[in-house]
Amino acid sequence: MTNSPSRPDASTSSPLADKGSSSGNGNERKLITIASGKGGVGKTWLSVTLAHSLARTGKRVLLFDGDLGLANVDIQLGLTPEQDLGAVIAGDAALDDVIARYTAADETSFDVVPGKSGSGALGNLSRAMLERIRGDLIAAAARYDRVLLDLSAGIDNAVTTLSAHKGEILVVMSPDPTSLTDAYAFIKLAVMRNPKSDIRIVVNNAENRKDGDRVYQAIKRACEGFLKISPPLAGIIRSDRRVTDAIRAQVPLLARHPQSEAAADVESLMAKLV
Ligand SMILES: Nc1ncnc2c1ncn2[C@@H]1O[C@H](COP(=O)(O)OP(=O)(O)OP(=O)(O)O)[C@@H](O)[C@H]1O
Ligand SMILES: [Mg+2]
């Protein structure tokens, strides 16, 4: 079975085991949060596709499913993990113990922390538990090149606590007019909580690049006018029916439709991140 869970090598699981280039700060900078104001804008799909795209270039990647009750990453990847984040929250397992190895149809592999399936939102967890999970992810980052966090929409406790790190925060928007106000509200709160947040904008589901740039200019103007910040553009991803096809097939887009427009757009976004 290719998608069986893997146990990381115990000799490298301590954050202290990786000294030198990967200092505590260095590890923290490896985190990338994928967030949004509005739901359903493509965060989980982008997280999965970015993880796969980074892994295809030889990077060691960990994808953390920090979404609400529904384990979305598992579904998009067709993973059936033995354990998930629920076991960590219940105190039955350490974060490292629930990491599962995923191997795509093109033989590319990356690691996944499967989301909490079943009832109860991550947002209801105590701040102490959320901080512990964030600390575990930073420690795990010593063994990876990038750690991606797929979070739920909006700005609840889980989102603010888990994204309080030195890495990038990709705010995903769609060309939908309500997405602009929701993304602005998200950025405003994120910056209020942490003025040093490294916020970058992703416009997903754009009709074309011009349409995507129009959306980006609108959010940039709002941020410059009211918040005195100018978040850079991480990338524009075009709307592409092959995205839906890949999700339905539970195969990452870059394995199923590597020549598609959306695949090319994710790859250029990825190239700017590394
Ligand atoms: N570039 C794209 N082109 C076409 N369809 C897309 C694109 N990106 C996302 N979608 C569609 O949007 C749907 C929602 O995507 P996804 O579940 O990743 O959103 P989400 O932001 O994670 O949602 P939630 O807020 O509920 O977690 C997908 O099922 C897919 O069909
Ligand atoms: Mg999602």
Image (cartoon, rainbow, N blue to C red):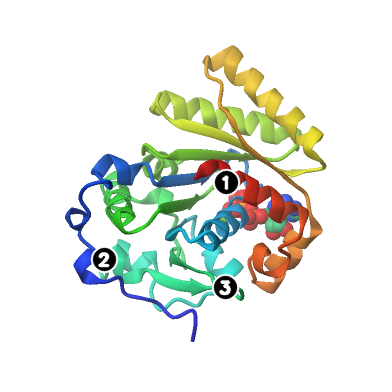
Question: What's the residue at 57%, 73% (across, down)?
Answer: 104
Nearer to me, 152 or 171: 171
Q: Quadrant of residue 73?
A: bottom right
Q: Residues within 10 Å of mark 1 (few under 14, many from 20)?
A: few
Mark 2 C-beta closer than 8 Å to ligand 2:
no
Along the polypeptide, which appears first: circle 1 or circle 2? Answer: 2
Q: Mark 2 — residue?
A: 94
Q: Quadrant of ligand 2?
A: bottom right
Nearer to me, 49 or 175: 49
Along the polypeptide, which appears first: circle 1 or circle 3? Answer: 3
Along the polypeptide, which appears first: circle 3 or circle 2? Answer: 2
Q: Mark 1 — residue?
A: 271
Marks 1/3: CA–CA distance: 20 Å
Residue type at the position of mark 2: Ala
Where does the image place residue 58, in percent across and percent down from the top left? 48, 61
Marks 3/2: CA–CA distance: 25 Å
Answer whether residue 40 is visible to the viewer in this image: no
Q: Residues within 10 Å of mark 2 (few under 14, many from 20)?
A: some
Is residue 164 left or right of 209 when viewed as pictured?
Answer: left
Q: Mark 3 — residue?
A: 104
